[in-house]
Image (tube, rainbow, N blue to C red):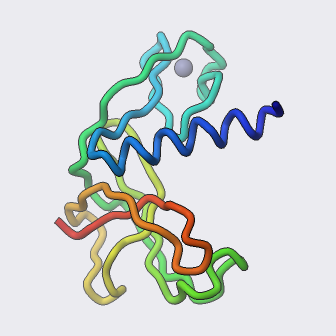
Amino acid sequence: MSDDEIQNDGYDQALAAIGDGEPYAIECSNGHTSMPPRRRCPECGDDDLSEVDIPTDGELLTYNVTHVPTPDFNEDVPFVLGIAEFGDVRLTGRVQADADEVDIGMPVELGLGESETTERPLITFDLA
Ligand SMILES: [Zn+2]
């Protein structure tokens, strides 16, 4: 199995946990959190990693509106892509709202949706 496959496997598991309402991130022994899961801490390279629960309530840090997608999202456009913070963990996800309803700093709720193009699962932020 390649590293890519292992990482993708971990990512699918992490997405499933979001769908179950029990999201988690990976924390190293130095307290760095990361998501999606990796085999080493991206900050310090530590491989002593454990799962930590993260809250489902977060705050939207930034967003943009995608009109020209990669082919995997051809049928999804336009959509709002945002970065939100849940506890210490920053995630990128689809904001489930029109751009004119969205403001930086607004509360969002972590969820799981799917691409309309590929029906693959993706991280979503619902307006709280
Ligand atoms: Zn670390």
Q: Residue at x 30, y 36 (%)?
A: 54
Height in image: 60 above or below 16? below
Residue 120, percent across and down? 56, 64
Residue 72, percent across and down? 67, 74
Q: Quadrant of the N terminus?
A: top right
Height in image: 109 above or below 37? below
Q: Residue at x 21, y 50 (%)?
A: 57
* Left or right: 27, with 36 as reference point: left
From the viewer's side, name the closer residue of 125 and 17: 17
The extreme left residue here reads 128
Q: Give the quarter of the image for residue 83.
A: bottom left
Residue 49, percent across and down? 52, 16
From the viewer's side, name the closer residue of 39 and 90: 39
* Left or right: 106, with 114 as reference point: left
Ligand 1 resides in the quarter of the picture at top right
Q: Quadrant of the C terminus?
A: bottom left
Q: Residue at x 54, y 87 (%)?
A: 77
Residue 97, percent across and down? 31, 81
Q: Give the quarter of the image for residue 31.
A: top left
Q: Residue at x 58, y 35 (%)?
A: 10
